[in-house]
Amino acid sequence: MLQKLLSRVRRAVTDYNMIQDGDRIAVGVSGGKDSIALLYCLNALSRFFPERFGIVAITLDLGNPGFDLDSLVELYNRLGVQYHIEETKIAKIVFDIRQEKNPCSLCSNMKRGAIYNTAKSLGCNKAAFGHHRDDVIETLLLSLFYEGRIHTFSPVTYLDRKDITLIRPMIYTEEKMIRSFIRHEGITPVKSGCRVDNLTKRKYIKDHLGELTKENPKIKDNIFGAIVRSGINGW
C-alpha cells in the first residue's frame, strides 16, 4: 500500500523538482492522517531517491486539550526518524485572547510561521506539508466562492522573508488513497483537539463536493486537470 502512495509522491517531487541533493526537510506533522502519510513516504523515499536528503519531523503543540503527543512520539521512535516538538500558545491566542469568530485563517498563519521558524532553527532549508489532491481542489473552490478569485496553493513556494522553500509532495495523491493506507497500516491518527474541527468552510466545501461527485464521478479529475492546464500559481 505504501508503494502506491510513493509512486504519486515521487512523480510530484520529480515533476516540480521539489528535492535537491543535500536538502534537509522539515516535515510538518500534526498527527492527522495526511501528515503521517507524508512522513512515511518521505522517510521511505529518502532511502532510495537519487538526490540524497534528510528529514526531521516537526510537531507543534498548539495547547489544545486532549492532544495525544505521546502517540506521536511513539510513532517517531518506531519509524526511527529525528523529531522535534515545539510548544506554542497558538490555541490560547486564537480562541481565548483573540476570540476569533473565524479562527482558521489566523491559526493557519501562526502555525505556518511557527513551522518555518522551527525548521530554520533546526538547519532545514525546506518544509513539507501534507496537502493532497483533494486539498488543491477544495482550496480553489474556497477562493472562488468566498474571495472571488481563482487561486490555489502552489506545489513549490520559495518564501524569501524566511529563506525557506515550502514543498507539497502529495499533490497528486487522492485523499481516499491516504485513508486506505492508514487503515491498512493500522495507524490511529491523533486528533488535534481543535474546538472548531468539522465546523469549517473547508468541511462545507468538502461535503458538497462529495455530493457533486455522486452525480459526476469525474468532477474532481476535471477540476484538477483544469488547475494543471491553467498553470495558475506555478502549476
Image (cartoon, rainbow, N blue to C red):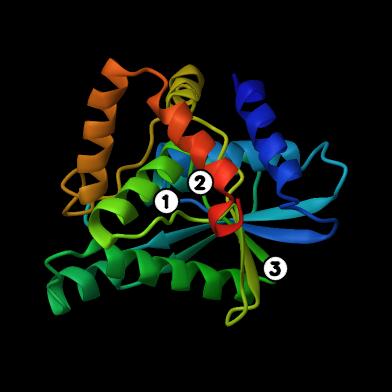
Gap in angstroms between the C-alphas marked 2 and 1: 9 Å
- Determine which residue is flagged by label 2: 130
Q: Left or right: 124 with respect to 73? A: right
Gap in angstroms between the C-alphas marked 3 and 2: 17 Å
Q: Looking at the image, which residue is at 71% across and 36% down?
A: 10
Q: In front here: 91 or 210?
A: 210
The answer to whether 220 is drawn above or below residue 229 in the figure is above
The x and y percentages for residue 11 are 71, 35
The x and y percentages for residue 208 are 22, 33
Q: Looking at the image, which residue is at 16% across and 54% down?
A: 195
The answer to whether 57 is drawn above or below residue 33 in the figure is below
The answer to which quarter of the image holds residue 228 is top right
Tag 3: residue type? Asn
The x and y percentages for residue 178 are 48, 29
Q: Left or right: 216 with respect to 72? A: left
Q: Which mark is residue 125?
A: 3
Inspect this view and state whether residue 16 appears. Answer: yes
Tell whether label 1 touches label 2 (CB within 8 Å): yes
- Determine which residue is flagged by label 1: 30
Tag 2: residue type? Gly
Count how many numbered circles sit on residues in the image. 3
